Amino acid sequence: MPILHSIIHRIDKRDGESPARVVPASGELEASAALDELLAGLNDAYHAKAKSWGRFNDDTQASLPGHLKRYLDDELDFTELTHELAHAIAPWSTITCRWAATCWSSIIARAKRAT
């Protein structure tokens, strides 16, 4: 599967008392063999763990489905979408953020490919 878009925003969680903060990337990453290897490693790590079923809360525009709809309707570009999603998951623990970001990236890639 080709990588259509890629960006890495940093979620900085310094200690248990201070809230996480998003350090946004300046733009998308260029395609490279190193990026392919990084994403393959993330994919392997994500799929190595058992998953339980869940559902996204779609009651508000601040939810993933709301952000994704705005992206698919061309109201947000990829960088804006990922920046908003990074801010949405920043309050969670850093471990949860890594897996949520991987999951969201996979969903976004599939949805954009389907349009």
Image: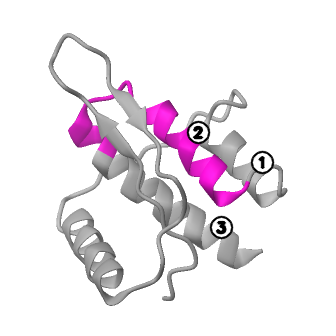
Whole-Å distance between the Cαs marked 1 and 3? 12 Å
Please provide percent x and percent y for residue 16.
16, 16
Please provide percent x and percent y for residue 3.
50, 81
Most extreme residue toward the top is 17
Q: Earlier in the sequence, mark 1 or mark 3?
A: 1
Most extreme residue toward the front is 26
Q: Which residues are magenta?
A: 77-97
Magenta part, dominant SS? helix
Q: Circle 2 — which element?
A: helix
| Mark 2: amino acid | Glu
Instruction: Depth check: give the residue in front, 40 or 5.
Output: 5
Whole-Å distance between the Cαs marked 1 and 2? 11 Å
Q: Which residue is mark 1?
A: 70
Instruction: Depth check: give the residue in front, 65 or 52.
Output: 65
Asked if residue 83 is among those painted magenta in the image, a careful observer would answer yes
Q: Are marks 1 and 2 in contact (CB under 8 Å)?
A: no
Q: Are marks 3 and 2 in contact (CB under 8 Å)?
A: no
Q: Earlier in the sequence, mark 3 or mark 2?
A: 2
In the image, taking residue 93 as reference, residue 74 lies left or right, namely: right
In the image, taking residue 15 as reference, residue 26 lies left or right, namely: right
| Mark 3: amino acid | Ala
Quadrant containing the C terminus is bottom right
Q: How many C-alpha atoms fall within 10 Å of the one at disc 2: few (<14), some, or many (≥20)?
A: some
Please provide percent x and percent y for residue 66.
71, 40
Residue 62, above or below 49: above
Q: How many C-alpha atoms fall within 10 Å of the one at disc 3: few (<14), some, or many (≥20)?
A: some
Instruction: Depth check: give the residue in front, 57 or 14.
Output: 14
Q: Circle 3 — which element?
A: helix
Q: Which residue is mark 2?
A: 84
Q: Which residue is mark 3?
A: 111
Please provide percent x and percent y for residue 17.
19, 10
